[in-house]
Image (tube, rainbow, N blue to C red):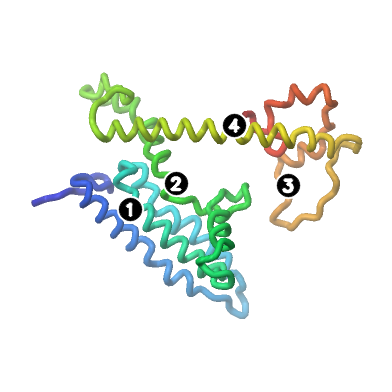
């Protein structure tokens, strides 16, 4: 009995078959990690650590992304968990995690930090488990309109009302994502409210530049930071007008 097939790379068919096939695919795709972790410096070249980190972040950690976008989160969960497990194991070896031990809280904190974006002090090793639902929702957001336009049977498709387990899962995931977005937005606002006045008080009374801080070459300020450093700090009365911006990013909320 044919339990499933692959269509444009994605697995279609029996859910258990799809889960098994995708987990096997993850293990095949991440098999090269064994060789990557064997890279070593030579007398002339001393960038093995940098190369390993680049390969881990931009190559190995992205191998499952297509499937997260093309298959339901409930189906991709086992593969995402296995993917994250293999990446965590490679990271542990790469950064010398044995010095603190895998069972301790120090490694758990380090692992969580590594999963953060680089701009937030992480290593950009995004968790596949964490982005399963956003990836699935994002795909539908992109394709629902073109599907209605290009295929007559889908002309009246309304994903907010369509019957079926896949659509039920999509709507539930969307509700969770909206809830999480609201919580994150509230947290950002709380942080901004606490730090905005402190930031302006820090640069106020100077020539408009924050105190000089010694930075490493890779921490040189970007164009936004240069703009802030050269700008005249606003007067207290102007702070409210600036409340729609985060001082550290100049990104509108």
Q: Residue at x 57, y 59 (%)?
A: 110
Mark 3 / mark 4, whichever is N-terminal: 4
Decide if residue 218 is on the left or right side of residue 77.
right
As drawn, the label of residue 221 is 3
**Can you identify the residue that label 1 sits on?**
78
Q: Nearer the viewer, mark 3 or mark 2?
A: 2
Q: Nearer the viewer, mark 3 or mark 4?
A: 4
Mark 1 / mark 3, whichever is N-terminal: 1
Residue, far bottom: 43
Q: Relative to residue 239, is residue 12 depicted above or below?
A: below
Q: Quadrant of the C terminus?
A: top right
**Can you identify the residue that label 2 sits on?**
130
Spatial separation of the CA atoms under disc 4 and disc 2: 20 Å
As drawn, the label of residue 67 is none
**Can you identify the residue that label 4 sits on?**
186
Q: Residue at x 74, y 22 (%)?
A: 241
Mark 3 / mark 2, whichever is N-terminal: 2
Cβ atoms at labels 3 and 4 below 8 Å apart: no
Counting other residues with Cα less than 10 Å from the Cα at mark 3, is it few (<14), some (14-19), or many (20 or more)? Answer: few
Spatial separation of the CA atoms under disc 4 and disc 1: 32 Å
Element at badge 2? helix
């Amino acid at each position: 009995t044919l339990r499933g097939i692959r269509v444009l790379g994605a697995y279609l068919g029996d859910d258990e078959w799809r889960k098994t096939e995708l987990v096997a695919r993850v293990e095949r795709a991440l098999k090269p990690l064994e060789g990557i972790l064997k890279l070593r410096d030579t007398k002339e070249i001393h960038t093995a650590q940098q190369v390993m980190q680049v390969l881990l972040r931009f190559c190995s950690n992205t191998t499952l992304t297509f499937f997260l976008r093309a298959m339901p989160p409930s189906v991709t969960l086992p593969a995402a968990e296995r993917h994250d497990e293999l990446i965590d194991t490679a990271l542990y070896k790469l950064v010398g995690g044995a010095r603190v031990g895998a069972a301790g809280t120090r490694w758990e904190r380090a692992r969580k930090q590594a999963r953060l974006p680089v701009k937030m002090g992480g290593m950009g090793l995004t968790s596949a488990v964490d982005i399963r639902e956003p990836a699935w929702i994002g795909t539908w957001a992109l394709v629902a309109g073109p599907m209605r336009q290009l295929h007559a049977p889908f002309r009246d498709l309304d994903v907010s009302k369509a019957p079926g387990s896949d659509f039920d899962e999509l709507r539930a995931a969307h509700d969770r994502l909206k809830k999480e977005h609201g919580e994150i937005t509230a947290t950002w606002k709380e942080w901004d409210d606490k730090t905005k006045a402190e930031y302006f008080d820090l640069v106020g009374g100077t020539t408009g530049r924050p105190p000089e801080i010694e930075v490493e070459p890779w921490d040189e300020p970007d164009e936004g930071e240069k703009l802030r450093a050269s700008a005249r700090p606003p007067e207290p009365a102007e702070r409210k007008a600036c409340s729609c911006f985060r001082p550290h990013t100049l990104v509108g909320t």
